[in-house]
Each structure stands twice: as structure tokens, then as C-alpha cells.
Image: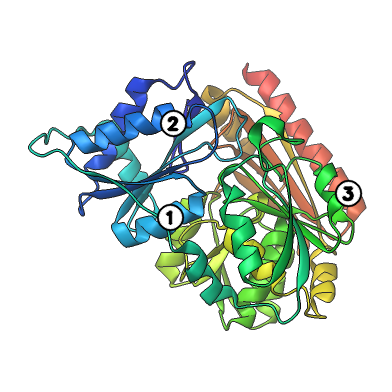
Amino acid sequence: MKISISGVRGVYGKDFFPEDVIRFCDGFSKLIKTRKCVIGMDTRKTGEMIGNLVSATMLERGIDVYKLGITPTPVVFRKAKEIGAGIIITSSHNPLEWNGLKFIIDGRGITEEELEIVKNERNLDRTKIGKEIIIESNYITDAIDIIGRLKKTQHVTIDIGGGSAVKIAPKLLREIGCEVEIINDRLDNCSRGPDPTSDKLTELISKTKNIGFAYDLDSDRVILVMNGEKKSSDITLGLGVVKAIKLGIKKFVLSIDSSLAVEKYIIKHGGEVWRSKVGEANVIQMMIKNNAEAGGEGSSGGFILKEFNMCRDGLLTSGLIASMVEDESIQKNLEFFESFSQIRNKVSVESSLHDKLIMKIAKKLETEYKIDQLDGIKININDNTWSLIRKSNTEDIIRVSTESNDIELLNKIQSEMIKKVECCYEEIK
């Protein structure tokens, strides 16, 4: 089981059990001042079982439960901003046998300090039983107000991935003026895995006439297909930034592993950039601290528009990108972002050894490079090349990422860093 500000995740029945659901929801209930909590879930088979436990626990603690049923994470965030708190039953892009809990307070993910309360505190208040209320969301109407409507109809193919975007994404894109073709609308008959950032998206590529979008199971991630190919997850973030700048936004926060090209684009257009640790909640905290209006994570194709939602929002982002397709400058922007390339690899390492391994790698690298340890180990090779080694918050892996506008240097540095990780791992096992 993985426990972080990104949520609680595990394989239900193996390392994530009913008593864990009750324990974490009990702790979270202590954070809820409004005594109201919205609950939604993705399409995993264990979602309903876990959802019933979540509801019962919150009701027993005197919290009114507002149920959205199967619905995307951004929709739950939007409603939780209005109500005061929320819980999403999801493990996002993790394999299908996984599930988990994601906690929202005051419209944002929980902080490290709040996580300690969720993990360790107990709510002994049993003086009142909460009410259960079935609700609907006005997400689509609100999103259209931000996106606007297309002047010319665009054909859009969307790959639902068997996830929770099945009702919301098609309706949103049709409402702004798209002609929508849907694939993989059912989880039990899906041609790809739950993570569109790592899947080849072969079917979507073959069926996309103009542009296509692929969502993960809870729709906070989205990947673009355009010009007959799958675009990198950083392109999603980059195009979200392009739209934000068109909307007059100047202050951005990018996770430390997001593309240097996106940062350069922002600065070129008169904006400011801050870098945060990886993780949606870390990006949001940095945005709040610096009064930044937008940002996100390139590794997850996650763009955040704080005014609308304090989370990665794949639904809104797909609408924002679709609204720019008729803009002639989009191709020029794509070419700029694609002048930089990034390689992301994973090395399997059990979580208990993550910290020890990172410390050992840092000691070896600091004799060769100047390193930044904001989150893992970031090595700035030159003005256009960097590499990052960091532990995952959600999986038993070490992530190794390198970016450069020089392909030969990119491959050389990435290979060197993977070897460093593997060698150091062998030494500590």
C-alpha cells in the first residue's frame, strides 16, 4: 500500500483492506469543518464496495454525504470546492487491480501536515448521524464558460479507456461545438491499459481524423493525438499553458520534471515560472504560495487552471486544446515544444529502499555534477539539458527522466543515469 498526499493506493484485498478504508476516512473526517463531503469513484470493480464503506464511515462520524456515483476526479474536485470536502475512490492510472482514496479539502488535495492527521488521528464524535444525498454536477456548464464555443466544427475522437469520462467528456466536447467519435467506452472491452501516458494508443491513432484525446480512469490525465501520432504528455501541459497565456495568465508553477520547453515558452511570453516537487498537491501548494494562476505536471499530461479547479483536469484541458485547433499558430507552438525531447523510464525498486538508494546515488553524483535535491536528484547538464532521478509516490519504482534539445546527448545521459540507479541498487540490496 502506498500512502502520500497523492492518496492512499493499494491492491484491494491484498495490501489495502476494509479496515484501512475506515481508518483513513475516520482520520479525514476530523479535517472537515463544513460537515459535508462529496464522494465519487472511477470505474474499477472494487469501487462500489469501497464507496459503501466510505459513505458509512463518514455518515457515522456525522458527515453529510453527497454522492456523485461514477464520475471523473475533476468533477468531484469542482463539487468539493463548493461543498468543502471530497473523497474520490480511485487509483488513477495504476493497474486495474489497484484502488484507493484521494482526499480533497477546501477544493485542493491534502498537505503533508493534513496527511498526518488522516493517517494517525481518530474521530470519536458519534453524537450525530449524517445524511446521504444523491446529487448532480454543473461541471459542464461551468467548463463551457471558460472554454467558449468553437466557431467551426472540429472532429474529435475520444478514447475513454473504460473510465469515468464516459458521460462527461463527450457531452462537454459536443457542447463546445465538436463532432465526437467515442472508443473504449467500456472497461470490460477496452483495447488499452489504464494509463494513456504509457500506452501506444494504437486504436485512437488509427481512428483520429483531426484530433484525439485519451483519458485515464479518473480523467485527471489526458493525452493528445494529432497529425497521425501520439503526442508526449508534456505537449498536453504545453498547449494548456498556451491557452492560459491567451487568457492573460502570467504566473505558472511547473513540477520539477516538466518540460524545459514549457518554461522557456512562458518566459518568452512575459510570464514567471516556479518549480515544485512532483505531485499535484505540491504544485497546488506552490501556486497558492506564489499566487500563480496555472501550471501542472508534464509527466502526467496534467494541466491545472486554478480559477476553475485545483487539480489536474483532463476534461477541461481537452476542451481548451480543442478550442485552439482552428488557430494557425498551434502548429508553430507544437514544433517549438517538440524541439525538446524527454525520455522517462522506470527502474523497479521496492519502496522500503527508495530513500537509502536516493541518498547513495546523490553522494556519487555530487562528485561529478551540481545537483538540486528539491525532489529526488536533478542534474542540470547545460542550459537545454537536465536529468532527474526520484522515487515514485505511487509505485515501487524509481523514475529516471532526461530532457534535451540534443537527441544524442539525451540518450547518452539517460543511459548513464539508469546505470547509476541499477548499480547503486545492486550495492544496497
Mark 3, Cα crowd under 10 Å, few <14 / some 14-19 / many 20+, is few
Report the residue at 68% width, 82% height from top: 269
Q: Name the amino acid type tagged 1.
A: Phe
> Mark 3 or mark 2: which comes first in sequence?
2
Which quarter of the figure has residue 17? top left
Tell me whether the residue at label 3 lies in contact with that at label 1, contact meaning CB atoms closer than 8 angstroms.
Answer: no
Counting from the top left corner in percent of width and height, residue 364 is at: 67, 36
Q: Name the amino acid type tagged 3.
A: Ser
Mark 2, Cα crowd under 10 Å, few <14 / some 14-19 / many 20+, is some
Q: Judge left or right: residue 295 versus residue 67.
A: right
Report the residue at 63% width, 44% height from top: 216
> Mark 3 or mark 1: which comes first in sequence?
1
**Residue that mark 1 sits on:** 77
Quadrant for the C terminus in the image? top right
Mark 1, Cα crowd under 10 Å, few <14 / some 14-19 / many 20+, is many
> Distance of mark 3 from mark 2, alpha carbons?
34 Å
Q: Which of these two is toward me, 379 or 168?
A: 168
SS at mark 2? helix
**Residue that mark 3 sits on:** 206
Which quarter of the figure has residue 381? bottom right
> Distance of mark 2 from mark 1, alpha carbons?
19 Å
